[in-house]
Amino acid sequence: RTGRLNDFPGEWPDIPFASVRLWDTRTAWLNLEPAQDQWDFGMLDANVDKASSQGVTDITLVLWGTPAWAAESLSADDAPWLGPGSAAPPRDNTDWVDYVRTVVNRYRGRITAYQIGNEPNLAWFWRGDPARLAELVDLAARVIHEVDPAAEVIAPGPMMTGPYVGSTMMRISRTLAERRTPIDAIAFHWYPPAGTDPHELVEVSAA
């Protein structure tokens, strides 16, 4: 069937699996808090409930997608399905921390991991600089570990077509190391060119 996955929210794959990552599921920050201090957890509740009922034991939520009211700036070049402002840093770190704390408090013990950021080396998803991103990751990671020590924190996952991460992601990684940010895992999204030998994934993993 054609269309986006979130056009058919009632559907579930026939094959069993134990892990799910919630992104492009209308569960971004801008969906959860469309206006300041006005929360809508309907879609995230539905996704978490559905996953749990299907035996999924590892649920990862991507914390990302700045709502327009909180954004430092608006741009028509942000991911069109998320809208202007979604790739911008928040104007006030207090709004970011409140979002993270509210979500983790609500889903403590149910959501098992949080990934902070989606493909931030693409302008569609991030228009800030590496230092600002590292600051947001650091703030979120400390809140998550404080509120739900059992939850894992996953670093932003860059989009990669080859075996090496870009300079932007290397700078973010160095900054997180300097801050001693409590990250539990790293991730990357590999989009290999047609005809790529799958064994090259080993090289990517070691890069």
Image: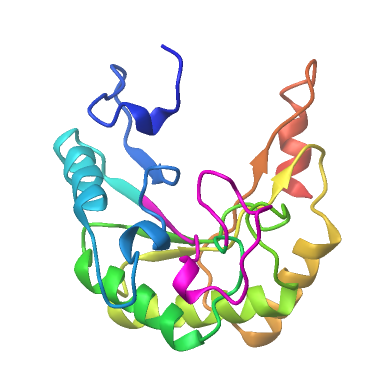
What colouring does the structure picture have? rainbow
Question: Would residue 191 appear left or right of 142 to someone viewing this image?
Answer: right
In this image, 136 relative to 108: left or right? right
Determine the image quadrant of residue 102: bottom left
Q: Residue at x 63, y 54 (%)?
A: 78
> Observer-nearest residue: 168 or 66?
66
Q: Which residue sits at x=50%, y=66%?
A: 66
| Magenta run includes residue 78 | yes
**75 sits to left or right of 110:** right
Q: Is residue 83 above or below residue 103?
A: above
Is 2 magenta? The answer is: no
Image point (42%, 82%), residue name: 95
Image quarter hosting the N terminus: top left
Magenta residues, start to end = 60-84
Expressed as whole percent of the image width and height from the top left, the position of residue 79 reads 60, 48
Q: Is residue 142 left or right of residue 86?
A: left
- State the residue in front, 5 or 68: 68
> What secondary structure do most residues of the magenta stretch adopt?
loop
Residue situated in front as seen by the camera: 105 or 183: 105
Place of residue 162 in the rendered image (x, y in percent of width and height, measured from the top left): 82, 38
Q: Position of residue 182 (x, y in %)?
A: 52, 77
Q: Nearer the viewer, residue 47 or 173?
A: 47
Q: 147 above or below 94?
A: above
All told, the count of numbered labels is 0
**Image quarter of residue 161:** top right
* Residue 200 position by quadrant: top right
